[in-house]
Image (cartoon, rainbow, N blue to C red):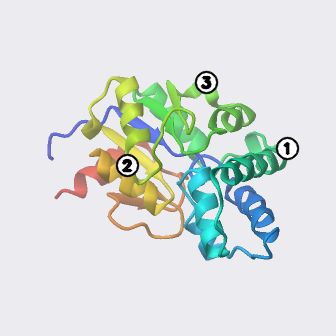
Amino acid sequence: MDNFEIKGLIFDLDGVIADTAHLHYKAWCEIGQQWGFNLSISQNEELKGISRKDSIIKIANWAGRNLSEAELEDLAKKKNEKYLKFCENMGTGDILPGVYDFIITCGKKGFKLAVGSASKNAKIILQKLGIDDLFSIIVDGNMVEKSKPDPEVFLKGAEILNLKPNSCVVFEDSQSGIQAAINAGMFSVGVGQKHLESCNHMIENFNGFSPEKLISKLSNSFN
């Protein structure tokens, strides 16, 4: 891997670009509470990176509920309405530390930039953050059928960017997202305080992180 060349960067949204996890958690808690079920923080961690429908199925299973397809669709709609209401006041101040400068710098250096998110609201959130125009493509839950750890969202991003998977780096805050990157044949950088297994590199946040450090860390991971 000494001669690898990174050309594309694919960013997850929730927990990587913006801190929306607490808003998702608040909405999911309200869904669970209608069954008298209290969703724990550790259970909420298991919902990161997967689709809204799959998240509802998990919560229903934890709550001992069997739902019809119609009930699943109805709850997915209700959860999204709750979440979007909580997101109404989001703005540039909700961008996580260092990530804006990192994205701007990478764009200037010629990297192709994309967002790969399970969220069907990714474009709305990025517009609220004022950074939707920084990315060549936003691949969201409306464009894919399979949830992470399936690699579909990242492979579609690479395809649209016209890049080979092994020339792309994925930035993720969830284990399912890291596994999706691995399944896609891409490099991966874990973001956050919680260690993510099998990623090529971990950062707590993007403060002080640069394209040069990225390439150096990835190169060192193979030496």
Residue at image coords 74%, 48% = 74
- Percent x, y of residue 152: 39, 41
Front label number (2 vs 1) = 1
| Contact? badges 3 and 1 (CB < 8 Å) | no
- Percent x, y of residue 157: 42, 32
Residue at image coords 49%, 60% = 174
In the rendered structure, the answer to whether residue 204 lies left or right of residue 25 reads: left
Indicate which disc, 2 or 3, sits on the residue closer to the N terminus. Answer: 3
Identity, as a three-letter code, of the amino acid under mark 2: Lys
Q: CA distance from mark 2 to mark 3?
A: 25 Å
Identity, as a three-letter code, of the amino acid under mark 1: Asn
Indicate which disc, 2 or 1, sits on the residue closer to the N terminus. Answer: 1
Q: Compared with residue 73, is residue 65 higher up or lower down, i.e. above or below?
A: below
Front label number (2 vs 3) = 3
184 or 99: nearer the viewer: 184
Q: How many marks?
A: 3
45 or 82: nearer the viewer: 82
The numbered mark at residue 133 is: 3
From the image, tell me which residue sits under label 1.
89
Identity, as a three-letter code, of the amino acid under mark 3: Asp
Give the class, few, some or many, for how many residues have Cα within 10 Å of label 1's Cα (few <14, many ≥20).
few
Q: CA distance from mark 2 to mark 1?
A: 34 Å
- Percent x, y of residue 193: 54, 68
